[in-house]
Amino acid sequence: MEKKNEAYKTIGEVAKIVGLINKKSGILSTHTIRFWEKEFNQIKPKILAGKRRYYSNEDIRVIKLIKHLLKEKGMTIKGVKLMLNESKTKILDDSLDNSVNSSLQKKVDFKKKLKNISKIIRELKSIKNG
């Protein structure tokens, strides 16, 4: 019998859905999800009798986003935490991906401007001391 899409999923089912599978052994990487639970307070599974974890669709969306940002975009855990805390929505879609890229681009632009200002200050000092 197949579960309804709205039903809570076990940690093994989530690992399959998200694609957290060890490529060499083929074993599900459920430990990664448990680690992310500790690192990201946005993941809040229901823990029922027997200490089994059950994840909602919202939890799965957040886990997909975290995996995408960490594994595919190469962000750090600290960076992903900042992004999730700044973000009002946690929907994994193109608009969020664009906002991620836009945010990173703004940081790169700011660093370039800061370097230019520093260069101008050095040039002004050299002219003054000239």
Image (cartoon, rainbow, N blue to C red):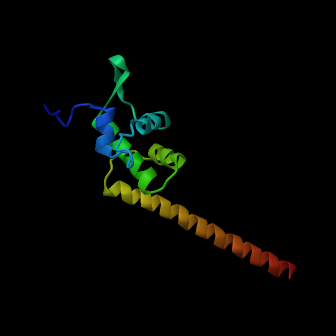
Q: Residue at x 81, y 81 (%)?
A: 127
Where is residue 106 drawn, in percent x and y?
A: 51, 63
* Residue ID at (34%, 37%): 59
78 vs 70, left or right, is right
**Residue at the limit of the structure toward the top, as seen here:** 49
Residue at horizontal 31%, vertical 38%?
14
Q: Residue furthest left?
A: 1
Image position, residue 68 (x, y; %): 39, 51
Percent position of residue 101, x then y: 43, 61
Residue 3 visible in the shown view: yes
Query: Where is the N terminus found, in terms of image quarters?
Result: top left
Q: Give the vertical position of 98 relative to 51 (above or below).
A: below
- Give the camera-side residue of 19 and 24: 24
Residue depicted at x 76% and y 74%: 122
Indicate the position of residue 90 as horizontal and vertical percent values: 36, 45
Question: Which quarter of the picture shows residue 130?
Answer: bottom right
Q: Is residue 90 visible?
A: no
Using residue 50 as the reference point, say whether residue 101 is left or right of it. right
For this rendering, which residue is in front, 95 or 53? 53
Q: Residue furthest right?
A: 129
Viewer-closest of 14 and 80: 14
